[in-house]
Amino acid sequence: QVQLVESGGGLMQAGGSLRLSCAASGRPFNTPGMGWFRQAPGKDRDAVAAISWSGGNTYYIDSVKGRFTISRDNAKNTVYLQMNSLKPEDTAVYYCAAGYCSGSGCSTFQPAYWGQGTQVTVSS
């Protein structure tokens, strides 16, 4: 069992930056991949970024490439999502997930555990 707790969400103006954190406890090494998802009102929950255990493989959706960076600190069992140049369309509840990477560069991520989510709101 893995428990995930997100933090760092909030309200930001367009063009600003936020850093989300996700602290894992339990047995996080059993689910070595980590990912961030987001869900806007009335929409499906979509993957945003994923990272392998070593951090050597990362994946981003096209709309966040060059703006968001996923990273992890295994000594702290924490994964981060640095979000720069935020846009109003980034507004969503962001969820951390622990799971499994596959494919080239963690391009396929299968979540097994979820955090409770943190709200990110970007104003224009």
Image (cartoon, rainbow, N blue to C red):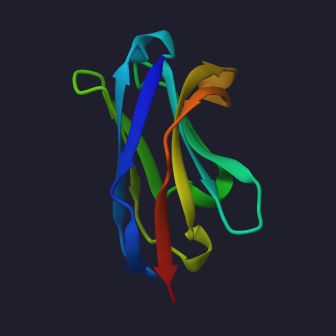
Task: Indicate the position of residue 95 as horizontal and vertical percent values.
Answer: 53, 47
- Relative placement, left or right, of 4 versus 77 is right
Q: Seen from this angle, which residue lies furthest bottom?
A: 124
Above or below 39: residue 77: above
What residue is at 67 percent from the left and 31 percent from the top? 107
Q: Seen from this angle, which residue lies furthest top?
A: 30
What residue is at 49 percent from the left and 40 percent from the top? 115
- Relative placement, left or right, of 43 versus 121 is right
What residue is at 37 percent from the left and 75 percent from the top? 16
Above or below 103: residue 48: below
Quadrant of residue 27 within the rendered picture: top left
Which residue is nearer to you in this view: 29 or 26? 26
Which residue is nearer to you in this view: 56 or 110? 110
Residue 13 in view (yes/no): yes
Above or below 23: residue 39: below
Task: Indicate the position of residue 58 as horizontal and vertical percent values.
Answer: 52, 33
Quadrant of residue 88 within the rendered picture: bottom right
Residue 51 in view (yes/no): no
What residue is at 65 percent from the left and 49 percent from the top? 61
Task: Indicate the position of residue 91 as horizontal and vertical percent values.
Answer: 56, 71
Task: Indicate the position of residue 42 as horizontal and vertical percent values.
Answer: 77, 67
- Relative placement, left or right, of 11 versus 115 is left
Instruction: Count the labels in the image.
Output: 0
